[in-house]
Amino acid sequence: MRIGFVGAGRMGIPMIRRLVAAGHNVRAVGRTPAARDAINGTGATAVGSAAESGQDAEAVVVCVFTDEQVREVCLGSGLLETMPRDSVLILHTTGSPDTATAIAGSPTAAGRHIVDAPVSGGPHNIADGAITVFLGGSPEAVEHARPVLAAYADPVLPVGALGNGQRVKLVNNALFAAQIGLVTEAVRLADQLGLAESEVLAALPHASSSSRAVLSVAAKGSVAAFSESVGDFLRKDVAVARELADRLGSDLGLLDPAIRAAVGPS
């Protein structure tokens, strides 16, 4: 397939590498010499703009950091206008479900398929072809996206209508942040009992308390090191979850104090 790619960063580069290895023809946006070198090093072709990446593309993948960047790329760069009709736009950025529906509802999206496809995992999962994707969109849009996602994602989990990928991912990240908060409190308790953090983190992954959160913290060696590596991502996503819950007249319930122990107020 001819694939455009916007967001050749920490997550994007291993995705591009897997797409090229699977035989796809990839054009990715690189705005600096270093970014262009990294893209060309994967076997893809570096281009200068999102609109250029979309020309004649059967699919375009967007893997940037924030909702604002997604809207800028998709609604302010000419990308949709250059994408052929019946092509598919794949949005990997975690954020508000309103962003995907706003893009799909824009006049320039007419005739194109849109899916929201936030991921769970990291660059090492992408390199193994085993990152999880929560896929929201119409059945037709989902089928258009599958050949692209198959290069680097397993499992790919359809979760219903457009926007539901983001809703599931926000629930996932709120729960994961709460679990990190519980690990933080467990380490604090261990300290009160006279245990070193390294000792307790070496033991917990082998016991009934183990979880993805425990394993992730233990792999980094400390709560502080893990929080440093993922704090910005979790704070961003938890803020969106809080905003959506507030809009519904609700809140995060018992998850909230545990989340605050992990990432603080947002």
Image (spheres, rainbow, N blue to C red):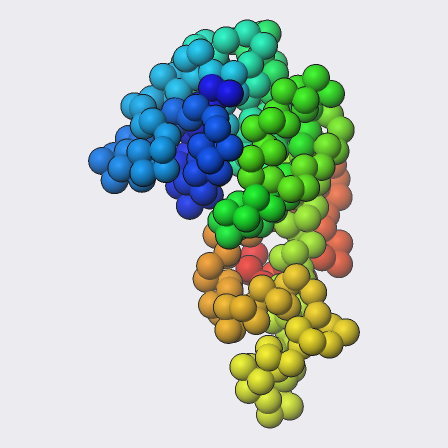
- Residue found 54% across the figure and 81% down from its top: 198
Q: How many marks?
A: 0
How far across and how far down the image is residue 144, in percent? Answer: 63, 20
Mark yes or no: residue 191 visible. no
Can you give x and y, in whole percent of width and height, for residue 60 in the image?
49, 23
Q: Residue at x 36, y 17 (%)?
A: 52
Q: Name which quarter of the figure residue 135 lies in.
A: top right
Q: Quadrant of residue 265?
A: bottom right
Q: Is residue 259 shown left or right of residue 124?
A: right
> In the rendered image of this protein, does residue 253 appear above or below residue 133?
below
Residue found at the far left of this picture: 33
Q: Nearer the viewer, residue 58 or 218?
A: 58
Answer whether residue 186 is visible to the viewer in this image: yes
Give the residue drawn at x 68%, y 29%.
Answer: 136
Q: Position of 6 compared to 263: left or right?
A: left
Q: Nearer the viewer, residue 227 or 114?
A: 114
Q: In this view, which residue lies farthest toward the bottom?
A: 194
| Residue name at image x 61 percent, y 16 percent | 113
Q: Where's residue 71, x and y in %?
A: 48, 25
